[in-house]
Amino acid sequence: MTETSINYAKALYGLSVPEEAICETEKIFENTPEIGKMLENPLVSLKEKEQVIERVFPQEMKNFLKVTCKYQKIDSIQEIIEAYDAYSREQKGILKAELLYVTCPTEAQEDKMKEFLRNQFSASEVELTLTEDKNLVGGFVLRAGDREYDWSLIGRYKKLKQKLTRR
Protein backbone atom coordinates (compact mmCIF):
# COMPACT_ATOMS: atom_id res chain seq x y z
CA MET A 1 0.00 0.00 0.00
CA THR A 2 1.24 3.44 -0.85
CA GLU A 3 1.55 6.22 1.69
CA THR A 4 -0.90 8.28 -0.36
CA SER A 5 -3.56 5.55 -0.12
CA ILE A 6 -3.00 5.28 3.62
CA ASN A 7 -3.36 9.06 4.00
CA TYR A 8 -6.60 9.07 2.00
CA ALA A 9 -7.86 6.13 4.10
CA LYS A 10 -7.12 8.03 7.32
CA ALA A 11 -8.93 11.08 5.93
CA LEU A 12 -11.92 8.88 5.04
CA TYR A 13 -11.90 7.43 8.55
CA GLY A 14 -11.73 10.95 9.98
CA LEU A 15 -14.84 11.92 8.02
CA SER A 16 -16.83 9.34 10.02
CA VAL A 17 -18.45 7.96 6.89
CA PRO A 18 -20.71 5.00 7.78
CA GLU A 19 -19.15 1.64 6.92
CA GLU A 20 -22.27 0.68 4.96
CA ALA A 21 -21.63 3.55 2.54
CA ILE A 22 -18.01 2.46 2.07
CA CYS A 23 -19.06 -1.16 1.50
CA GLU A 24 -21.69 -0.06 -1.00
CA THR A 25 -19.12 2.06 -2.84
CA GLU A 26 -16.71 -0.87 -2.96
CA LYS A 27 -19.45 -3.11 -4.39
CA ILE A 28 -20.29 -0.54 -7.04
CA PHE A 29 -16.66 -0.46 -8.20
CA GLU A 30 -16.44 -4.28 -8.14
CA ASN A 31 -19.73 -4.91 -9.94
CA THR A 32 -19.38 -2.18 -12.57
CA PRO A 33 -15.72 -1.77 -13.52
CA GLU A 34 -16.80 0.54 -16.36
CA ILE A 35 -17.56 3.27 -13.80
CA GLY A 36 -14.05 2.99 -12.38
CA LYS A 37 -12.52 3.14 -15.84
CA MET A 38 -14.60 6.19 -16.71
CA LEU A 39 -13.65 7.98 -13.49
CA GLU A 40 -9.96 7.18 -14.08
CA ASN A 41 -10.03 8.36 -17.70
CA PRO A 42 -8.16 11.69 -18.02
CA LEU A 43 -10.11 12.52 -21.21
CA VAL A 44 -13.40 12.68 -19.27
CA SER A 45 -13.95 16.12 -17.73
CA LEU A 46 -14.14 16.57 -13.97
CA LYS A 47 -17.68 17.92 -14.36
CA GLU A 48 -18.82 14.71 -16.11
CA LYS A 49 -17.15 12.60 -13.43
CA GLU A 50 -18.91 14.57 -10.70
CA GLN A 51 -22.26 14.05 -12.45
CA VAL A 52 -21.72 10.29 -12.48
CA ILE A 53 -20.69 10.32 -8.80
CA GLU A 54 -23.87 12.27 -7.94
CA ARG A 55 -26.09 9.71 -9.67
CA VAL A 56 -24.42 6.44 -8.65
CA PHE A 57 -22.74 6.60 -5.25
CA PRO A 58 -24.04 6.89 -1.66
CA GLN A 59 -24.51 10.45 -0.41
CA GLU A 60 -21.86 10.09 2.33
CA MET A 61 -19.15 9.13 -0.21
CA LYS A 62 -19.85 11.69 -2.93
CA ASN A 63 -17.55 14.49 -1.72
CA PHE A 64 -14.71 12.09 -0.97
CA LEU A 65 -14.93 10.55 -4.45
CA LYS A 66 -15.06 14.00 -6.07
CA VAL A 67 -11.85 14.96 -4.26
CA THR A 68 -10.12 11.73 -5.35
CA CYS A 69 -11.16 12.48 -8.94
CA LYS A 70 -10.03 16.10 -8.70
CA TYR A 71 -6.55 15.05 -7.51
CA GLN A 72 -6.45 12.06 -9.89
CA LYS A 73 -6.29 9.40 -7.15
CA ILE A 74 -9.49 7.57 -8.08
CA ASP A 75 -7.39 4.83 -9.70
CA SER A 76 -6.24 3.92 -6.16
CA ILE A 77 -9.76 3.66 -4.71
CA GLN A 78 -9.54 -0.11 -4.11
CA GLU A 79 -6.24 0.34 -2.28
CA ILE A 80 -7.70 3.26 -0.30
CA ILE A 81 -10.65 1.12 0.80
CA GLU A 82 -8.31 -1.73 1.81
CA ALA A 83 -6.18 0.75 3.79
CA TYR A 84 -9.37 2.14 5.37
CA ASP A 85 -10.41 -1.35 6.50
CA ALA A 86 -6.97 -1.99 8.03
CA TYR A 87 -6.86 1.42 9.74
CA SER A 88 -10.42 1.06 11.02
CA ARG A 89 -9.63 -2.37 12.53
CA GLU A 90 -6.46 -0.95 14.08
CA GLN A 91 -8.37 1.93 15.69
CA LYS A 92 -10.93 -0.51 17.11
CA GLY A 93 -8.22 -2.86 18.44
CA ILE A 94 -9.17 -5.67 16.06
CA LEU A 95 -6.38 -7.91 14.79
CA LYS A 96 -6.75 -9.75 11.49
CA ALA A 97 -4.97 -13.12 11.45
CA GLU A 98 -4.78 -16.17 9.22
CA LEU A 99 -4.41 -19.79 10.26
CA LEU A 100 -3.12 -22.27 7.69
CA TYR A 101 -3.80 -25.84 8.79
CA VAL A 102 -3.83 -29.46 7.65
CA THR A 103 -6.36 -30.66 10.22
CA CYS A 104 -9.11 -28.24 11.15
CA PRO A 105 -8.65 -26.99 14.73
CA THR A 106 -11.28 -27.55 17.38
CA GLU A 107 -13.17 -24.59 18.79
CA ALA A 108 -11.10 -24.79 21.98
CA GLN A 109 -7.84 -24.69 19.98
CA GLU A 110 -9.14 -21.73 17.98
CA ASP A 111 -10.01 -19.90 21.20
CA LYS A 112 -6.51 -20.53 22.60
CA MET A 113 -4.91 -19.18 19.43
CA LYS A 114 -7.08 -16.07 19.58
CA GLU A 115 -6.16 -15.57 23.25
CA PHE A 116 -2.45 -15.98 22.37
CA LEU A 117 -2.78 -13.35 19.59
CA ARG A 118 -4.71 -10.94 21.84
CA ASN A 119 -1.86 -11.13 24.37
CA GLN A 120 0.92 -10.84 21.77
CA PHE A 121 -0.59 -7.86 19.95
CA SER A 122 -2.58 -6.23 22.78
CA ALA A 123 -5.72 -6.54 20.68
CA SER A 124 -9.25 -6.46 22.04
CA GLU A 125 -10.55 -8.82 19.34
CA VAL A 126 -9.09 -11.23 16.77
CA GLU A 127 -10.58 -11.99 13.34
CA LEU A 128 -9.16 -15.40 12.45
CA THR A 129 -9.40 -16.66 8.87
CA LEU A 130 -9.00 -20.43 8.52
CA THR A 131 -7.38 -21.83 5.37
CA GLU A 132 -6.67 -25.50 4.68
CA ASP A 133 -3.17 -26.18 3.27
CA LYS A 134 -2.23 -29.83 2.74
CA ASN A 135 1.31 -28.78 1.70
CA LEU A 136 2.16 -28.19 5.37
CA VAL A 137 2.10 -32.01 5.89
CA GLY A 138 1.07 -31.49 9.52
CA GLY A 139 0.74 -28.77 12.15
CA PHE A 140 -0.16 -25.16 11.37
CA VAL A 141 1.10 -21.71 10.43
CA LEU A 142 -0.35 -18.66 12.19
CA ARG A 143 0.09 -15.24 10.53
CA ALA A 144 -0.81 -11.95 12.17
CA GLY A 145 0.50 -8.46 11.58
CA ASP A 146 4.10 -8.79 10.46
CA ARG A 147 4.70 -12.05 12.35
CA GLU A 148 4.46 -15.68 11.36
CA TYR A 149 4.39 -18.58 13.81
CA ASP A 150 5.31 -21.73 11.88
CA TRP A 151 4.52 -24.97 13.68
CA SER A 152 4.07 -27.04 10.52
CA LEU A 153 6.05 -30.19 9.84
CA ILE A 154 7.37 -28.76 6.59
CA GLY A 155 8.47 -25.57 8.39
CA ARG A 156 10.23 -27.53 11.13
CA TYR A 157 11.91 -29.70 8.49
CA LYS A 158 13.23 -26.59 6.71
CA LYS A 159 14.55 -25.13 9.99
CA LEU A 160 16.30 -28.40 10.87
CA LYS A 161 17.79 -28.63 7.38
CA GLN A 162 19.01 -25.02 7.70
CA LYS A 163 20.68 -25.73 11.05
CA LEU A 164 22.40 -28.83 9.74
CA THR A 165 23.78 -27.11 6.63
CA ARG A 166 25.21 -24.25 8.72
CA ARG A 167 27.40 -26.63 10.72
Image (tube, rainbow, N blue to C red):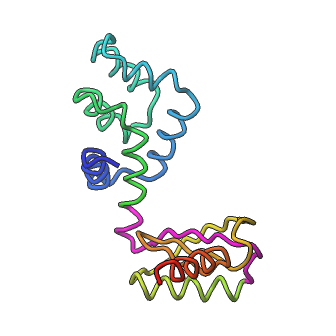
Which residue is at the far left? Answer: 71
Quarter of the image where one finds residue 4? top left
In depth, the one of 32 and 106 nearer the eye is: 106
Horizontal relation, residue 37 to residue 112: left or right = left
Q: Residue 121 at what x, y percent from top left?
A: 40, 81
Give the mark count. Answer: 0
Q: Residue 89 at what x, y percent from top left?
A: 42, 65
Q: Residue 48 at what x, y percent from top left?
A: 34, 14
Q: Give me the residue at 61% from left, 71% from top.
A: 99
Q: As displayed, is residue 125 above or below residue 8?
A: below
In depth, the one of 79 and 19 nearer the eye is: 79
Q: As displayed, is residue 52 above or below residue 163?
A: above
Q: Is residue 105 magenta?
A: yes
Q: Which residues are magenta?
A: 88-106
Q: Is residue 165 magenta?
A: no
Q: As displayed, is residue 146 above or below residue 118?
A: above
Q: Give me the residue at 23% from left, 26% from top.
A: 70
In depth, the one of 112 and 133 nearer the eye is: 133
Q: Residue 140 at what x, y percent from top left?
A: 65, 77
Q: Give me the residue at 28% from left, 54% from top.
A: 10
Q: As displayed, is residue 34 above or below residue 99?
A: above
In depth, the one of 129 and 163 nearer the eye is: 163
